[in-house]
Amino acid sequence: MSLLVSVFGFAIVAFVAVRLTRRRSANEPPVVGGNWPILGHAVYLALHPSEFIAKCREEYGDIFTLATPGRYITIICSDKAREIIRLPDRKSSFHHATDELMRVNSLFGNIFEPGSYHFPLIRTRLTAMIDELNLVMNREMRRIIARFLEQHAGKSCIPGAIVGQDSYTDSAHCLDHDSIPDIRAFVEAVISETVGIALVGEQCAKDSALLDSCRHLAHDFTTVMSASEFLPSFIAKRAPAIMRHRNNFFRVIIPEVLRRREMMDNLPEQFKRPADFLQVLVESRSKDGDLRAPEDIALRLMHSVFASVHTTVMTCTQTLCDVVGRQTVRERLEQEQIDYAKVNGSVTTRAALDDMPFLDAVVRESMRFSNLSFNVVRRAMTDITLRDGTFIPEGRVCAVSAHGVNCDYKAYGETHNAYLPERHLESPIAKASSAGPAYVIFGGGSHVCPGRFFAINQIKLLVSILLREYEIRTESGKRPKNVSHLIDVVPLPEKVIMKRRAMPLA
């Protein structure tokens, strides 16, 4: 056993040494000093990534290189990011970078081949289904909110208060107020479950173990991902948490795929097409006209749940923090809800939510400020020379500092560090779901996030429900402070007071 440990340790040291001792070429971005033996700058990135990147930018400029175990990573904090992002995959690969940093193929199967077919289906078919899904998510969000408040406040929030979607019984049955201790946990509970229902379907979501996987897959995957840098792929993919979630998806999804196809073939007149993303995958075919394998559908659905839950929870948490912690913003949003309801009632279609410009501006501004330390990555598939002469060697992973680009002085001027949703009302194209050179929360180029319209719709829907049906604010009256956690930016726990309105805003 000791011999095995020694060999494994020697292999890691040798691997790191080979990767990090390559001779540097002229015009390469400067390498940040002060790195630890073997670990490089990984400790700083794990503890305080946003602060560390900001400090490096101040000292080394808009583009610099960090050492991590086994590789260098070049960080881009300016509009140079757009040049890297827009290069074709044969020169600057999203898929190779994602798999190298996150072991996506090892943990979810080879989802990038053949053809990444579920990505365009998310972009087109899932987006087209938003109005159908909103009918379900509207109902489910209300149910989950009530359950969360009952569980965490220790008492029932709305016993019998909601009848159907928008009808109310005697408001005296509602409690005066409740509170939630952690806004992130609240958002995670609501978003993860509604995402799960929208993607795997209401029938499959009745399986408590599968729904539990929808809730915890993102957290467990990022935990395994953090440790997998030092583990062979065949070990990482067999981590107990990953195996449990994989088994839940296979156990429920594969029989459901077969059941639906049998119904479609043999009893088409009795088959009622479900409004969920699983059905889209069930019907999808390869270029040769073959139906997708049920096992492959389960893996791609599992990956879709992970990607949707993790990013949407992070961005929705930040948006809600700004809503409950900024009184002037909240009051303007409440007035917008009242003005809209007078004309359109309680309709919550995608078009209806898009017709709330200040809500859209708030979501965009919240995402501009409070996002991943670096969420856009590419791997140089060949030597790359940028227009200004900066040299990126073949094999180098490049990561875009989201905060550095989204809050760039060149793009936003003197108010680049000020929270001003109004700035986005001045431009008809500055929407929360759009991507651009100074707004890279959804990436860019050919790999811009395919689920961004679905994600923004969920955030707006949740905020709209809370504003209409609750008086909601932080106990302190201030916005919760953010801290860095791995690649995420998360708020410190802060009690949020929720008082149910006698009647919704109208």
Image (cartoon, rainbow, N blue to C red):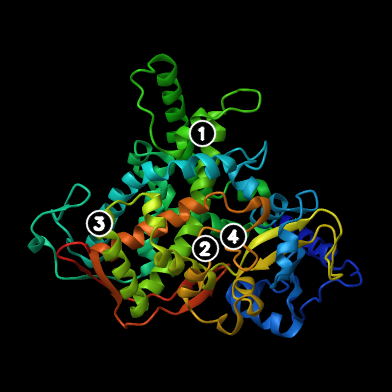
Task: Calculate the distance from the C-alpha at mark 3 to the C-alpha at mark 1.
Answer: 31 Å
Q: Are the residues at dot 1 and dot 4 in contact (C-beta closer than 8 Å)? A: no
Q: Which residue has dot 2 on it?
A: 428
Q: Quadrant of the C terminus?
A: bottom left
What label does residue 435 carry, if any? 4
Which is more foreground, mark 3 or mark 1?
1
Q: What residue type is labelled 4?
A: Ala
Which is more foreground, mark 3 or mark 4?
4
Residue 173 visible (yes or no): yes
Q: Quadrant of the N terminus?
A: bottom right
Q: Earlier in the sequence, mark 2 or mark 4?
A: 2
Q: Say above or below: 295 vs 227.
A: above
Q: What residue type is labelled 3?
A: Arg
Q: Residue at x 32, y 44 (%)?
A: 136
Q: Which residue has dot 3 on it?
A: 147
Q: Give the secondary structure at mark 4.
A: loop
State the image coordinates of residue 66 (x, y, percent, origin top left). Answer: 74, 72
Q: In this view, does 102 lie to the left or right of 248?
A: right
What label does residue 281 carry, if any? 1
Q: Earlier in the sequence, mark 1 or mark 4?
A: 1
Q: Residue at x 61, y 37 (%)?
A: 117
Q: Earlier in the sequence, mark 1 or mark 2?
A: 1
Estimate how packed mark 3 is, as few (under 14), some (14 to 19) or many (20 or more) residues with alpha carbons within 10 Å: some
